């Protein structure tokens, strides 16, 4: 919403300057986007009087001017063809920065003659692209006075952003009212005198709705004005419209734009001779078409309100008039429409049709229902003034919708809700100045004005009082501390997540955050891509499915990096994967990928990322989250997107804790990824919570007796898992066996086909005496027997 | 020169001349071995008279000791030489790079989230969470956003396809539905912040279809706008790690708060960097207000007894402001170079005692 300072002053009696007004506007909730003051940029330019303009002695196309600056007369060389004796121009002294090139003007010598200043073109001071001649100011401009004033540019333009609840602030008058209430001046009366009609309107108006749809347009007023003479509107109207970025069109159109901004009252003027019969407001027929004033043809539907004559729709109600029935230079009889439309209906229609107009902007925020008729009178008055003509009586369909409501307002609420102590008389003053009718009792009985449909309760009234009295006056009040020393607030799950994040980063992973939606074909590779997880209105065709796993996001990221020449990376992300499109059907997952073999190095220590890297990552993260050792067994195989023979699943009973492994070659191919690729997915919600009841650790009781290590190599079936051998060995003598580990695996020469040699190291830790050789030997035999029994393996000799 | 002296000289010269341990050993055997020259001398003591023995004994023994010492000294010297030679041979080029180790990083949004949590945890705010896919009722209706509100349109809100039961849900457009969930689940007093991913149909240089917000909610019997103002001031000081900030509270409008307030902080953006507490620019930090009584009512809280404030801000935006990240969209593009450039070291955990950042 734009307006100029002088326009505002027509509604507000104030001495305040643009800066003070802008500051107040922002502080009362009418946020100033910008204050454009062209006069500030031109402050060094003055009105210069050309005492004489003679031919330059040494150049045919240049002129030698003597310019009176009000304080002295200086010699200026000028190339403009229109420079002439007796004119007044925009003069820059030496040293003044010329806006078009940002350089300070120097005293120059042109063709042997000194030039001490410049008469400027419009382009040189950035008013337009005009550069054929210098600016010629009105002859009555005062020599030496600021040029901006003579140019009519000394009127700052203020642009205010209006929140959707403040329809009343879409007018200069409404803004003036708020400012007056805030103490920045006195609101001038906005009352409009009725204009008497000279004859009955030849066109009647009708509201053509069912009771269900009647609120779409509850009031439709109109008036016929005959024998008008359309043409350009007066200069002051044109200047005013131009200042706020509107293009003057003709007096009849400019009047509606002027009133729209001045009073927040949108109107429409039809060329009455292009209308057939009476006017009506009705819902459009499905498929009905209308070419609007923007030259575009819109296809309407039965949710939209139109203004129509007896033949067809002539305007999209409250949004834009039709092109065919608009006013032209030769329009002589007009029909002026002023109506009240339902804000929600206007918003919906405007959105559907994609039309942004000044009328829609106001109607969807809510206009003053009591100003429908005065607005029509004001338009009549201006049309008669600018175009002459004779008005008919006003014709009206419907009635002003009911807006009066009384709100009970306890003034304590201001202190209670805002922590601001505002004396009761001040509350009364603020509300009254804003147009509220306040009955002085306790609680106050408050009737909001017709233009404030947004006010519906005590909290709204507190807001009015606080924003006008001054939000900056609300004193900061420290909140209480629930505990003197802050207590932890994270839930166990939140803490786990944080630990997993930092553990993975500490292992060398770079954390990424990627979109929760991915391409449907990618989702399908990971068990998703179904209709239930589809986004109806995706931002892009390849972001149309809720991701069923985080891996496709990471793989797509890896592919983008690979395209940039990065072949080694470690990425992880923590986020949601979606099980369906229902709220809550999501799992928090920490997923990671390793691509490549790590950085190449002269140390030759790198290796192709494999399932055991992923296993280590997964276990490290889970154990860090648990704060303990993960003892759950790993089972071979994982989800379909993993290599079936090189992947595993960690599960606790029915709960899957994690998948890890190398990825299925088809997956790598689908993402166009080359090189080794290992991944893991940890389902954080499934990680068991720590059950420890006490913070104290168990007693530290190291055995004083020597531990013993013994190695065994077993020949077992190739398919026998290491886990089976380890478990069997460990179970052979639980009290003494401290740990068992695999230190070698061999298949090939010396081991029969279909078999492998698996070497384990067993650590024995006696607790009450040192073991004798015989005892150690006996335990060794037990271990061999146990492994043989469970796996069918034999001791390799 | 006595014979004894000449023997000693001869042996010591041989010791000094031994080039390695083997040569030294032959010298030792020649002097002190079973048939060595000194051993032979010592054997002669048995055939001497006691008086003679008294004289010769100590001489012989001294000779033997001196030779022993000389051998030991030479042996040690030879060992050192050999070790020095080996060490010289074992020299490496220490300018070669160390074994490569990957350097992990924390995403700036995660880092800033931990910073925000550290601050609000100190004030007793718990962390509340909610799902990304949300009921229309929680995302809009219970927040006093009417059915015809523009925000509900497909232009602004992502909709998930209808489910098997016919229900149709949204990707939450803000973290505010977590307010609703919290109020429905918990009786006042309530103090939470709710961080998380949010989604809007918007994509250009400064908008991403997914971004992060954090929401704050306090509901009790006494909390008012003055407390909100204080929290905003204290938060900004703590978060931006400055001694003072100049804040501006502007009346605004949100359907779920009344009165509604937007907070700006004064800053200087000249020179491409943001400095707080100076300059003439205002930077929007958060939208906020007193929770609208209609919202309280719809969430089962008696608005005649309870009141409080809510606020919301952008986590990505905070990260960008604090750490000079110019552009929003690369945050979610997983460019390794970007992650390394803007990421944080894993052990740089924000704390109030150690400071939120280095």
Image (spheres, coloured by chain):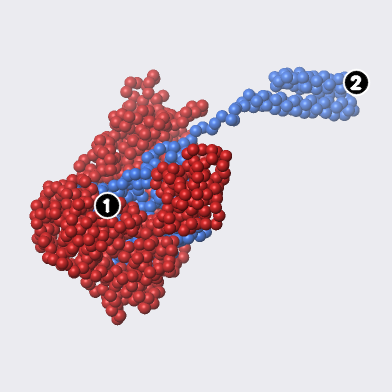
Chain colours: A red, B blue
Distance of label 2 from label 1 (alpha carbons): 137 Å
Residue at image point 45% right, 47% down: A84
Residue count near mark 2 (Cα–Cα under 10 Å), binned few <14, some 14–19, many ≥20: few
Tell me the residue that label 1 is attached to.
A249
Q: Chain of mark 2?
A: B
Which residue: 54% across, 48% down? A75
Give the residue at x 38% y 31%.
A562
- Which element carries disc 2, helix, strand or loop? loop
x, y percentage for residue A610? 38, 31
Task: Name the disc covering residue B1, or none.
Answer: 2
Residue A379: image tag? none
* Left or right for A526, reference A492: left
Please provide percent x and percent y for residue A432. Answer: 32, 74
**Whether residue A359 can be seen here:** no
Q: Nearer the viewer, residue A675 or A387?
A: A387
Q: Position of residue B218 (x, y in %)?
A: 36, 63
């Amino acid at each position: 919403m734009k307006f100029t300072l002088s326009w505002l002053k027509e509604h507000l009696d104030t001495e305040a300057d643009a800066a003070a007004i802008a500051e107040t506007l922002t502080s009362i909730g009418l946020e100033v986007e910008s204050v454009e003051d062209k006069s500030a940029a031109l402050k060094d330019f003055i009105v210069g009087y050309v005492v004489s303009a003679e031919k330059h002695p040494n150049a045919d196309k240049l002129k030698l001017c003597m310019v009176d600056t009000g304080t002295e007369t200086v010699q200026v060389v000028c190339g403009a063809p229109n420079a002439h004796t007796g004119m007044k121009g925009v003069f820059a002294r030496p040293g003044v920065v010329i806006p078009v090139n940002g350089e300070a003007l120097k005293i120059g010598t042109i063709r042997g003659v000194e030039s001490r200043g410049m008469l400027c073109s419009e382009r040189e001071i950035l008013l337009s692209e005009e550069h054929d001649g210098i600016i010629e100011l009105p002859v009555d401009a005062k020599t030496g006075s600021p040029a901006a004033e003579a140019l009519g540019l000394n009127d700052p333009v203020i642009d205010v952003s209006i929140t959707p609840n403040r329809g009343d602030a879409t007018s200069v008058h409404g803004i003036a009212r708020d400012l007056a209430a805030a103490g920045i001046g006195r609101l001038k009366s906005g009352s409009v005198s009725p204009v008497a009609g000279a004859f009955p309107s030849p066109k009647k108006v009708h509201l053509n709705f069912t009771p269900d749809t009647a609120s779409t347009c509850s009031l439709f007023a109109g008036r016929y004005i005959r024998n008008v003479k359309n043409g350009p509107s007066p200069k002051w109207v044109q200047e005013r419209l131009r200042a706020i970025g509107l293009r003057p069109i003709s007096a009849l159109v400019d009047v509606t734009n002027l009133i729209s901004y001045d009073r927040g009252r949108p109107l429409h003027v039809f060329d009455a001779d292009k209308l057939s019969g009476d006017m009506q407001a009705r819902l459009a027929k499905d498929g009905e078409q209308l070419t609007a004033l923007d030259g575009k043809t819109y296809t309407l539907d039965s949710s939209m309100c139109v203004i129509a004559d007896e033949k067809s729709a002539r305007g999209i109600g409250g949004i834009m008039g039709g092109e065919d029935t608009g006013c032209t230079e030769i329009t002589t009889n007009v029909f002026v429409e002023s109506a009240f439309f339902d804000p929600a209906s206007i918003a919906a229609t405007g959105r559907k049709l994609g039309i942004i107009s000044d009328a829609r902007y106001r109607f969807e925020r809510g206009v003053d229902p009591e100003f429908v008729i005065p607005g029509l009178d004001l338009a009549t008055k201006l049309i008669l003034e600018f175009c002459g003509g004779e008005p008919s009586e006003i014709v009206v369909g419907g009635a002003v919708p009911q807006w009066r409501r009384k709100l009970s307002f306890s003034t304590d609420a201001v202190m209670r809700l805002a922590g601001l102590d505002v004396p009761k008389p001040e509350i009364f003053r603020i509300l009254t100045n804003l147009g509220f009718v306040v009955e002085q009792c306790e609680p106050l009985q408050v009737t909001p004005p017709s233009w404030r449909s947004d006010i519906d309760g005590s909290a709204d009234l507190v807001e009015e009082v606080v924003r006008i009295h001054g939000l900056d006056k609300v004193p900061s009040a420290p909140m209480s501390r629930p505990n003197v020393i802050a207590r932890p607030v994270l839930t166990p799950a939140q803490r786990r997540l944080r630990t997993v994040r930092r553990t993975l980063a500490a292992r060398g992973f770079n954390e990424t955050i990627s979109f929760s939606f991915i391409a449907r074909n990618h989702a399908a590779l990971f068990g998703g891509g179904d209709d239930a997880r589809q986004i109806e209105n995706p931002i892009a065709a390849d972001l149309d499915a809720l991701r069923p796993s985080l891996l496709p996001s990471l793989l797509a990221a890896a592919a983008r990096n690979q395209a940039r020449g990065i072949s080694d990376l470690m990425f992880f992300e923590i986020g949601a994967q979606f099980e369906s499109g229902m709220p809550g059907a999501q799992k928090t997952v920490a997923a990671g990928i390793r691509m490549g073999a790590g950085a190449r190095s002269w140390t030759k220590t790198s290796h192709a990322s494999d399932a055991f890297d992923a296993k280590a990552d997964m276990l490290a993260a889970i154990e860090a989250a648990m704060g303990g050792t993960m003892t759950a067994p790993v089972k071979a195989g994982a989800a379909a997107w993993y290599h079936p023979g090189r992947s595993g699943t960690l599960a606790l009973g029915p709960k899957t804790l994690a998948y890890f492994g190398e990825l299925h070659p088809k997956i790598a191919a689908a993402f166009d990824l080359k090189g080794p690729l290992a991944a893991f997915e940890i389902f954080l919600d499934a990680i068991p919570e720590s059950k420890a009841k006490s913070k104290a650790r168990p007693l530290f009781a190291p055995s004083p007796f020597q531990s013993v290590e013994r190695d065994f190599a077993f020949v077992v079936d190739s398919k026998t898992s290491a886990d089976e051998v380890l478990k069997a060995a460990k179970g052979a003598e639980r009290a003494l066996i401290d740990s068992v580990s695999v230190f070698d695996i061999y298949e090939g020469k010396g081991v029969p086909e279909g078999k492998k040699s698996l070497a384990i190291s067993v650590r024995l830790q006696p607790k009450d005496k040192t073991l004798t050789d015989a005892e150690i030997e006996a335990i060794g035999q037990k271990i061999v027997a146990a492994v043989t029994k469970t796996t069918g393996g034999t001791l390799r000799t | 020169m006595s014979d004894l002296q000449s023997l000693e000289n001869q042996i010591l010269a041989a010791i000094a001349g031994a080039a390695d341990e083997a040569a030294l050993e032959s010298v030792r055997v020649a002097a002190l071995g079973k048939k060595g020259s000194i051993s032979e001398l010592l054997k002669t003591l048995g055939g001497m008279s006691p008086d003679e023995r008294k004289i010769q004994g100590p001489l012989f023994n001294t000779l033997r000791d001196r030779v022993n010492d000389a051998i030991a000294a030479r042996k040690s010297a030879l060992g050192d030489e050999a070790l020095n030679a080996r060490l010289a041979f074992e020299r490496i080029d220490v300018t070669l790079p160390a074994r490569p180790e990957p350097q992990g990083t924390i995403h700036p949004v995660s880092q800033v989230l931990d910073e925000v949590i550290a601050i609000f945890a100190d004030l007793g705010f718990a962390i509340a969470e909610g799902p990304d896919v949300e009921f229309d009722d929680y995302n809009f209706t219970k927040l006093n956003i009417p059915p015809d509100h523009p925000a509900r349109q497909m232009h602004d809100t992502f909709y998930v396809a209808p489910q098997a039961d016919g229900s149709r849900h949204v990707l939450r457009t803000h973290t505010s539905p977590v307010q609703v969930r919290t109020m429905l689940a918990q009786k006042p007093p309530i103090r939470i912040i709710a961080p998380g991913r949010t989604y809007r149909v918007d994509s250009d240089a400064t908008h991403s279809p997914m971004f992060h917000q954090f929401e704050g909610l306090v509901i009790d019997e006494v909390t008012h706008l003055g407390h909100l103002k204080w929290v905003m001031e204290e938060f900004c000081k703590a978060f931006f790690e400055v001694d003072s900030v100049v804040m501006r509270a502007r009346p605004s409008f949100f359907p779920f708060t009344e009165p509604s307030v937007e907070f700006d902080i004064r800053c200087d953006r000249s020179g491409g960097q943001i400095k707080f507490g100076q300059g003439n620019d205002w930077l929007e930090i958060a939208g906020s207000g007193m929770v609208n009584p209609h919202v309280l009512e719809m969430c089962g809280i008696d608005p005649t007894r309870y009141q409080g404030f809510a606020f919301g801000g952008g986590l990505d935006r905070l990260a960008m402001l604090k750490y000079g990240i110019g552009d929003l969209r690369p945050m979610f593009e997983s460019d390794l170079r970007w992650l390394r450039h803007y990421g944080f070291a894993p052990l740089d955990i924000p704390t109030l005692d150690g400071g939120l950042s280095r």
